[in-house]
Amino acid sequence: MQSKMIAPMPTELDKCLGWRDAIYVLPLFLALFATVFSPHKPLQNVVANTILQAEGYRTWMFGGIYLLAALLVLTRFTTAMRQVARHVPYLLFLVFVVWSVTWSAHPEKVLITWGHYLGFYLICLSAVVALEWREWSFYNLFFAYGTIAVVATLVIVVFFPDRGIVDVGGKLRWLGFTNSPNSLGVMMLVTVWVCMIWISACRAWLVKLLVGLLLLPVFFCIYGSDSMTSAILAVLVVLLVPVLMSICALSPSRAAGLFGGFLLLTTVAVLILYVALPELFVAKSVLGNLTLIGRSATFTGRTSLWTVALQAISERPLLGWSFDALYSVGDRFIVRASHFHNGYLELLVTGGSVGLSLILTLVGIVVWRIIILQRVLPRLAAAMAVLLMLILLHNLAEASLGRTPTLLWLIFTLMYLVLAQKPPTDVTELPPECTGGSSVK
């Protein structure tokens, strides 16, 4: 049984942010939308549409958010620097990214990509300086994000279908205000995660009911996007959150063992499903139109991309082709997609074994800190564990881990910086935060 530990000073772990602190979270809130947003009317070729939208307006949009984050960090420079001192492994990855300019055929692209990496870091640093260990402010941020995303998607799809729906291979797929249906799927996946946290953590049945009702249009949006990867992972979230909430409420030793075994079994099950039935991870409507992005009809058409990736890895196994948005590898091989549809292969292509090792080191640190956090904040540890599992599994089908500017890499960076803080010492007595209910212990 866990023993109580009294914090040396009031930590106000669950106290909501005041408006002054909320300003420091604003760049993060804006960036969560910016990673998937597109102002353009979609083209018939979704992949070409995404590539075209990667330029122009994004420079100004992200540049403004990064500048705001940098200015906010400067206003709390001393506090921020104390946080930065705990981020050495992450900073080493940033150094490696910019170092790849020395072997890239397109160094200007490396600098642009590195600017996004640095910008994401500043955004999350600004947010963590304000959030600290305010657990429910962390959930509320994503709940507000998901609610706005769902409402905006439904409004655009219903009233502006020319903008919100795209024809892919003869099937209509929703994308709302995002740059692709898969982006909409990922955004809804994050919303499912935070809704399940609310349902599992709150004791007020009215809150549970209202949040549960929000899940209905969320799953409807996932169905409309025809993003099979997001649909499978969303179902997995619904099953995982209550289980991990229960596991993390146990003693640290039992929780670590059960969590490790559960994580291993879940990962193996998804891998078996991915190998045995890979078509589940790609929208069926795309299979009939794979030539648009250079795919074949075997193994969901990804083998052609993976073959190119393996050839590229064999030529530069140590340092990769650099983080220049695949421009250098595109000069050597024919790559007709915006990514290799497997984030781990893509990391080997761009950063080689060194780059992949750095990313896996960050993942390992996050796992270790989640285990440590379970002793103090079991509910947050469970939420982080599910979120990390989603990112790692999603990275099997789409490149997101270590790839910027993407939604899931932004969230991973936020997780890393949050967990890098010195854990609070208040073990069991957390102030009630849910409307009409108390915190789950």
Image: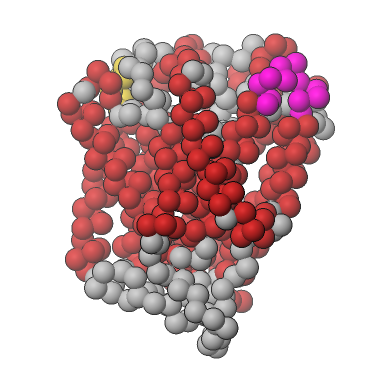
Please tell me whether residue 203 is drawn above or below residue 53 in the rendered image.
Answer: below
The residues colored magenta run: 100-111
Left or right side of 162 for 14: right
Question: Would you say 278 lies left or right of 315 here?
Answer: left
**What x and y, as percent, mark residue 290?**
47, 16
Is residue 242 toward the left or the right of residue 220 in the image? right
Q: Main secondary structure of the magenta part?
A: helix
- Residue drawn at (72%, 34%) of the image: 97
**Where's residue 369, x and y in %?**
63, 63
Name the residue at the left extreme.
159
Q: Quadrant of the C terminus?
A: bottom left
In the rendered view, tell whether residue 18 sits above or below residue 249: above
Question: Is residue 110 magenta-colored?
Answer: yes
Which residue is more in the foreground, 139 or 348? 139
Q: Left or right of 6: which side holds 135?
A: left
Q: Residue 350: x and y, percent?
A: 70, 28
Is residue 394 visible in this depiction of the protein? no
Query: Residue 132 at x, y = what percent?
Result: 52, 63
Residue 72 part of the magenta-drawn span: no
The residue under the point 63% across, 28% down is: 113
